[in-house]
Each structure stands twice: as C-alpha cells, then as structure tokens.
Amino acid sequence: MLQVAYIKEHKGHVIERLAIRNFANAEAIINQVLAIDENRRNTQTKLDNVLAESNKISKEIGMLFQSGERQKATLLKEKTGQLKAQSKLLSEELATLQEELDDLLYQIPNIPNVLVPAGTTEDDNEVVFKEGKIPTLHKGALPHWELAKKYDIIDFELGNKITGAGFPVYKGKGAKLQRALINYFLDKNTAAGYQEVQVPHLVNEASGFGTGQLPDKEGQMYHVTGDNLYLIPTAEVPVTNLYRDVLLKESDFPVLHTGYTPCFRREAGSYGAHVRGLNRLHQFDKVEIVRIEHPDNSYEALDAMVGHVKEILRELKLPYRILRLCGGDIGFTSALTYDFEVFSTAQDRWLEISSVSNFETFQANRLKLRFKNAEGKSELAHTLNGSSLALPRVLAGILENYQTENGIKIPEVLQKYTGFDSID
RNA sequence: GGAGAAAUGGCAGAGUGGUCGAAUGCACCGGUCUUGAAAACCGGCGAGGGUCACACCUCCGGGGGUUCGAAUCCCUCUUUCUCCGCCA
C-alpha cells in the first residue's frame, strides 16, 4: 500500500510510473485519494477540537467535585450533551472517510522502479542474463512426467486419488532427491547469512493482509473457513509477517531469513501442457529467502539475492536465464522483480523457478514495519524476498536435463545429500 | 474440551472512576567527573495523527458499552499462565 504522504508529494511521478503497469484510471484514483485525504484531515481536526473542548469541561467538573461545588458541576454537565453528539457524528464521518481512503489505496499497485521496462505481457520481459549449457539429449529423451513414471519416482495418479489434481506423491529416490534439494538450498542460504526459520503453514487474516494477499487476492489461497485461516501460498507470508508491527533499530539491519515450507495455490483456470506434470501444482515445496533492509541498501540487497540464486543454479549446472519483469507482468506489490527460468530441454521451454523482488515500503506500510532512523524518527523499512528455490520445477529441470539413456544422473553438489548418484 | 487467574512503555512492575500517557527500577542515549573505563551524580528516554513549529487529539491485548470523565466499571473476542481431561 502506498503512503498518502508520498502520493501527495510526488503526485506527477506516481501517475507517470503507474502508467508503466498499464494501471487504468491512475490519475482519477490518485486525485480521489488526495481529495478524500484532505477531507479526512479536516474532519480529524474538527473532531480533535470537539474532543479538546469536552476534555477541558470534564477536567473542570472533576475539580468542582473535588472542591465540593456540586451544583456548578451539575450545571456544566448539561453543556456536554451537545459536544458528545457532535463528536459521535464526526467520528463516524471520520471512520467512513478512512474506509473509503483505504479501499482506494488497496487498489493501487506498487510504483515500478525506473528499471522496469514498459510492456503488457510476459513477452515484453527483458532477458538480462543467461548462463549454462543447454545439453543435447539423446534420441527419445522424455519430458519429466514420463521420466517420473518410467523410474517410478513421482505418482500423479495416486495424488489424484488422495486429494485431487495438482497434488503429486513423490516416491523413493524422487522423494529423496526432493529432500536433498531442500537441505542443499537451506545449507546454501544459511552459509550466505540467512537465518533459518520454521514457520506456521496456516496464517490469519492480518498476516495475509500484511504482505498483500488480502483483501483482493484471497482467490489464490486455500481458506480454512472453520477457523478463518489461510494455507500459505508462499513462505513470504509468515516469514515477512514475523516483522509485522515491529520497530527496528538501524543496527538490526540487514535482517535475513530463509525458510522451507510447502506452498498451496488454488490457481484456477489453467489447463493443457503448461500444467502437465510438475509445471503447475496446487501444493509444492519451496525454500524462500526474505530480507528486511534499510531503504538505502535495498537495491544492493536485491542484487545480492540475485547473485545468490545464480550461484545455486551454477552449482546445479542447470541452464537458466534471468528476466526483468515488465510493467504488465510484475506483481501487484513489487517495485522490481527478477524471474529466474530454467530451461526444460525435453519440453523445449523455460520454467520459472525463482522470483526475486523488492517491495520497497509497499508491504512495510501495511505491516507497520519501521525502524528508527539516524534522526530518531520512525521510517518504513524495505522488504524483499525471493525463492531459492521452488522445488518442482528445479526437479523437472534436473530430471530432463540430466537424463541419459541409462538413467538420470544426480548433479554432483547434490550427491552428498542424496546418497546416490543416479536414478535408474 | 472444563475450572480459575492474568494481559500496562524495550523489559520488570505500580496504578481499581477525575490535572494518569501513566510511579519506580533496569536497559538505552547525552553530560559532569576520569589518562581511559567503571561507579556516582545530572538530564533525556513509547507510538500514531496533526502543525513551519507549538497547541491539540488518539492509544494501557482487540472490539463494543456505562459515565461529564475509564488503564481503572460492564459485555465480548483473542492470547498467556495454573489445575483437570485428551494427545504426537
């Protein structure tokens, strides 16, 4: 959520930048925000004055009672009725205005960073980096869902029986390989200074609100109605919310966390080859990195996160590329996002395996995540997060790129985690 | 799940209807003293709104109510603790 004060001071810039996102009616909404905010402040001032007056009278009554002048006090009491009615009216008005203001602010996405390219679809994303050799596969190489069946390491049918489509069952070396990846990722992240955390997989409304999934995107989350909780779509939600309503000291920066969680996504509406196998699931595992940074350092931090994910993919020897998401594809809450895609050789397409973003103060504003700056004033911190990494597609990438006629090789860095060097 | 107790500033902890945004201690920041440090002493020290700055307003777990006036009384929700039950 953007700050009204910021919108007020940088109105032109905000409208101009939001155009990059093809955000309709930006100017109209911004004007409306500013108008309501002014109204809100005026109403607040009026209310404050009424309250000040009645506070004053109350104190006088108190003093009169203490000095035994009961009659005078009773007289004064009568004066307060009108003030009460006024303050009730004004505070109702204020609450309505605040609600209207919030409703508008929830609709406004984050302001894209200057690096964000214009564009409308994923085709307009900018490829900023590419690395790794795309292997030449043997004749008759298979897509991962066929390999999964051939070597009996992932069972999609069983998952259908137990739950439904999009909930695979990993078996034997498939399960081991996945666990190995989780441990490897966590170890890499920990070595890079990210403190490991284990967090709840169900969150309350306030948490969903803090990171921006609520109020508008509840459709992407599974809702446990009996207890009004949501299954997390990503570890970002519980991990970032660890810092909801927190006032940090400058010396607390940087805050670095990593966590492994399953992720649950409803993702209605997709079908076909693009959702085959592990390409898109309702439940998948992911290791996440989260940072909370001083505003001056957040872009440096973003680069560091990108560098970190690069290193992991390099070690896994997977061909990948990095995209800078365009205005039409970048997430609602993000100011700048880099997507990592691994090349799925057997499917001949790129699969998104990581998304690294700087949210600047957009989440912090909702989270009330602040720090005391050098002048001793409270200032919103910057939040960032990234996947390092999303498991299923990394798994798909490994299965497909490492397949041979005699089986699937295990990337060297993983062998000490799996305890085997091939699946056959 | 049942019964009882509790929730106050970074922490501990007073405050049960009136100049209480809140005593006191610790922590923290600044100063005096000291070669330096510690100790001692002096001063400062919650958050949000509002203002050029003041004033002023709001906040004592959340929400609602009683009252001229609520940290204090009432209702409700949440959380924590103790006892019982159940359980990995």
Image (tube, coloured by chain):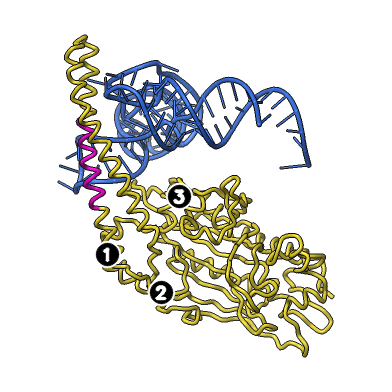
What's under tag 3, amino acid-wise? Ser
Q: x%, y% of residue A219?
A: 53, 60
- Check disc 1 and report its element: helix, strand or loop: helix
Quadrant of the image occupied by residue B24: top left
Q: x%, y% of residue A98?
A: 32, 49
Marks 3 & 2 on one chain: yes
Q: Nearer the viewer, mark 3 or mark 2?
A: 2
Marks 2 & 1 on one chain: yes
Residue at 82% over, 74% down: A151
Residue A50 drawn in magenta: yes
Of all chains in the rendering, the one displayed in yellow is A
To which residue does mark 1 refer? A11
Alpha carbon of mark 2 to alpha carbon of mark 1: how far?
20 Å
To which residue does mark 3 refer? A251
Alpha carbon of mark 3 to alpha carbon of mark 2: how far?
29 Å
Residue A417 in view = no
Of all chains in the rendering, the one displayed in blue is B
What segment carries the magenta color?
A38-53
What's under tag 2, amino acid-wise? Leu
To which residue does mark 2 refer? A115
